[in-house]
Image: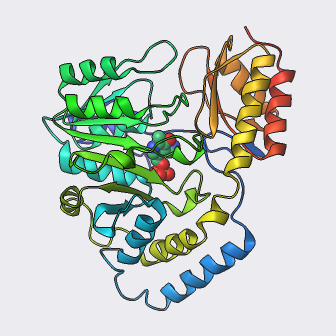
Amino acid sequence: MGGVSARLEDLPLRPDLRGQKPYGAPQAPLPVALNVNENTHPVPQDVADDILDSIARALRDVNRYPDREFTALREGFAEYLGHGLTRDQIWAANGSNEVLQHILQAFAGPGRTAFGFSPTYSMYPLLTRGTGAQWVSGTRAADYTVSASDAASQVADAAPDVVFLCAPNNPTGTPLHLDVVEAVYEAADGIVIVDEAYFEFAPADARSALTLLPGRERLVVSRTMSKAFAFAGARVGYLAADPALIDALRLVRLPYHLSALTQAAASAALRHAPVMLGMVDEIVAQRDRITATVEALGYTPHESWTNFVLFGGVDDPATTWQALYDQGVLIRDVGIPHHLRVTAGTADETTAFLDALASVGSAA
Ligand code: PMP
């Protein structure tokens, strides 16, 4: 056999996956990486030490499978979320991506559809197609908002098995108010997922869809430790829903899907929630600084309740993206014409981005 490797097209791949593109945010080792909406502040040393102690203890039993029901971690999330939630209403997995995948495996799949208002999180269609279901795109207004009545009529027309409401929305930052969730829930027969990955960055008086859970057994609210919690590398996401819905997810998860080390690390981090979330106000301040400064440079930032800003008025996004890259600043071209997206970093990282953007010339 020679060393020539096969091409993807030569393999007996599922027909519905042919021609699909994998998730591909560039991972380049640049000094200022503001492209995937992480919390760029490292975990404080004393918290890291305590997490390490917990991992060390878990390591002593690592010859055994972990708690398949990750009971302590579910209790931790229930306590963190509040709203009277208990552990039988909580699920978790390796990132909220896997949490969403579990929902789609249980409630989408071949012959079924999942729906979201585009532009929205790019993994929704990929995860949907991965389960053999079809993705259906709804539309937003020009400013990326979606009203309750419009949302409800689009969902009623599409009659999807699963609806994604990204609140606030990635990649646009747009808030989504609870009247939209209520209207979509009424209009849908299927599962309604409110993805609150960025909820901690919303204004303090913003209301979570968690408040809508009682009496709505098809409603799911997902969260992640990857953003505000500064824990992206640990891969931990979670959700709250009716206990019956959680039972459905047990049908599709792999046994022991959350490793003992992940459970130990996440439970320890949760015990330090106020410290882990300590940088949120600072990140919000940097986000608002980005908004004000890119506007002063002649760009058009969109309202954001997240840790990133989408801004328009970019003549040629690919050229601006490359010019920033060449100055060591990595941001994201999300494929929206004349737009770029940047994550709010530390004050220094944010300054590096704003200086680099100013140096590439003004807006179109
Ligand atoms: N939902 C949204 C809206 C996101 O932006 C992301 C990450 N970019 C995720 C879910 C998934 O994050 P994770 O798997 O790290 O929890």
Q: What is the total number of numbered labels drawn onto the structure image?
A: 0
Give the quadrant of the C terminus: top right
Asked if residue 164 lies left or right of residue 81, the reply is left
38 and 329: which is toward the camera: 38
User: Which residue is pictured at 60% across the width and 31% down the height?
Assistant: 304
Quarter of the figure with residue 157: top left
If the image is split into quadrants, where does the N terminus sit? bottom left
For the point 36% across and 87% down, which residue is it? 64
Left or right: 259, with 113 as reference point: right
* Residue 1 appears in view: no
Looking at this view, is 325 or 222 the one in front?
222
- x and y percent of residue 280 in the render? 67, 50
Does 205 appear above or below 48?
Answer: above
Q: Nearer the viewer, residue 138 or 339?
A: 138
Asked whether residue 268 is in view, the answer is yes
Where residue 243 sits in the image (x, y, percent)?
22, 61
User: In terms of image quadrants, where is residue 110?
Assistant: top left
Q: Residue at x 59, y 44 (%)?
A: 204
Left or right: residue 248 compared with residue 121: left
